[in-house]
Image (spheres, helix red, strand yellow):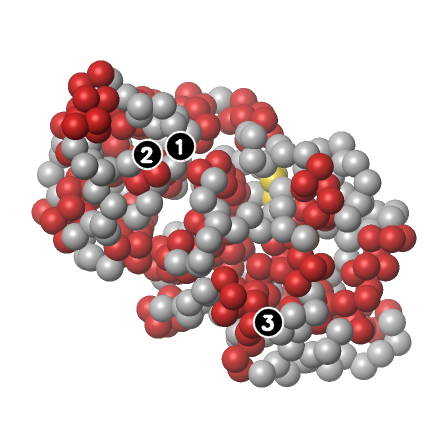
Amino acid sequence: MTMGRGPFGPLMLWRLWEMEEVLLTPPDAAEVRFLARGVVSAATCDRGLTPLQELLIPALFLSMTGHPVELAEVTPIGAAEFAAGMARRNRVFRERIVQTMLLSALVVRPLPAATGNQLREYADALGVDDDMIAVAQRYAEGAVDLAAVDFTRNGYLGNTDTLRLDALHTAGLDSSWSAVTDDAGLAGRWAELWELPVWTLGRGVADFYRDRGFVTPGLPGSAPPLLAQHDWVHVLAGYGTTLENEIEVFAFMARANDDPRAFSLLAMVISLFETGYLRAGAGLFEADAGHLSTSGMATRLGDAMRRGALTRGSHDFLDLDWFSLADRPILVVREEIGLVAKDGSAVAAGSAGPWQPGGITPYQLNSSKNAAAADGREYLPWQPDPTRD
């Protein structure tokens, strides 16, 4: 595992981190058991772990480290003792561990106030400051509306700087998630994707939209251009468009980005599609709780994070100018970023690609048929090369 930014902790840990050589090797089985002690101790509630937490925590550690965790063998550990045991790990590693704590806690509703305070205690001991800790504490206090404001203010999700606007190829937005429904230039750029050869990334995205009846940005009824950015990831990484797939995509995106603030993407979709803490998000999504709790999803989430972590370099897929890659073959782009295949356990658990069974909702399928009828064309499901998914 790797970790992110944040101020250092108490003076004692300052001295430890200065004196000891930084440990950069992957954690071995013994250290993984130690890390699990800290995560469980920070994320547990007074009534113990929930059934979902009991599935999720081992799945995360197995996917991200390759070492299994037996929760029955995990004993509690205090924040100070855990931080001392992490003294040789750098800020990047510690940040990721705090995010594992957060993810393990954010799946609980209602989240007890004591758990919210525990998360802050362990993060402070580790010298980590993550915006999502404040969100978790808002949830624990029952201040859900204030938590939604915290998401809006988050430096990553609320970013509307020049780099992002240039990548979206549209004029200034009122907010990151604003829709653009009357922009002929933007609509024309998306329409040009149809002219690309089959098996290119851009043509794949055009097919992706057509086969779901989606409206491309720049036209009435379209999704926000920023949300459309993640549609390219569906095609590139091979994930369908059910709500379970959405959890996978945002987990992949969050972990492929070295900026620790990108974790807010995953926190957002968990708050939408598992706990329902957020009523709406990303300019289009509405709450629909319970999807991470469905069979196999803990494994699929862990595998999506693993695939994101193993990509070469750091990838901010929301700020990427995807049109600069549109004419590239999908398989070439995958190779360039070092995208690894899904683990067999995730596939067996139901992780499907955009054109595989289970990778589209009945509503989307019906929308695509209606769109074909409105255009006066026969509905012909596209048959992709199996290597594409």
| Residue at 82% in and 40% down | 171
Distance of label 1 from label 3 (alpha carbons): 33 Å
In the rendered image, which quarter is residue 128 located in?
top left
SS assignment at label 3: helix
Under mark 2, the amino acid is Arg
Q: Foreground: 319 or 182?
A: 319
* Vertical comparison of 208 with 97: above or below: below
Q: Could you tell me how many numbered marks the image carries? A: 3
Distance of label 1 from label 2 (alpha carbons): 6 Å
Q: Looking at the image, is mark 1 or mark 3 earlier in the sequence?
A: 1
* Vertical comparison of 244 with 23: above or below: below
Residue 254 in view in this figure: no
Q: Looking at the image, is mark 3 or mark 2 earlier in the sequence?
A: 2
| Residue at 12% in and 49% down | 30
Q: Which residue is mark 1?
A: 5
Q: Foreground: 73 or 367?
A: 73
Q: Position of residue 131 (x, y in %)?
A: 46, 28
Q: Foreground: 8 or 370?
A: 8
Q: Residues within 10 Å of mark 3 (few under 14, many from 20)?
A: many
Q: Residues within 10 Å of mark 1 (few under 14, many from 20)?
A: many
Under mark 3, the amino acid is Ile
| Residue at 16% in and 52% down | 28
Q: Which residue is mark 2?
A: 91
Q: Which residue is mark 3?
A: 330
* Vertical comparison of 100 with 357: above or below: above
Under mark 1, the amino acid is Arg
* Vertical comparison of 141 with 379: above or below: above
Q: Residues within 10 Å of mark 2 (few under 14, many from 20)?
A: many
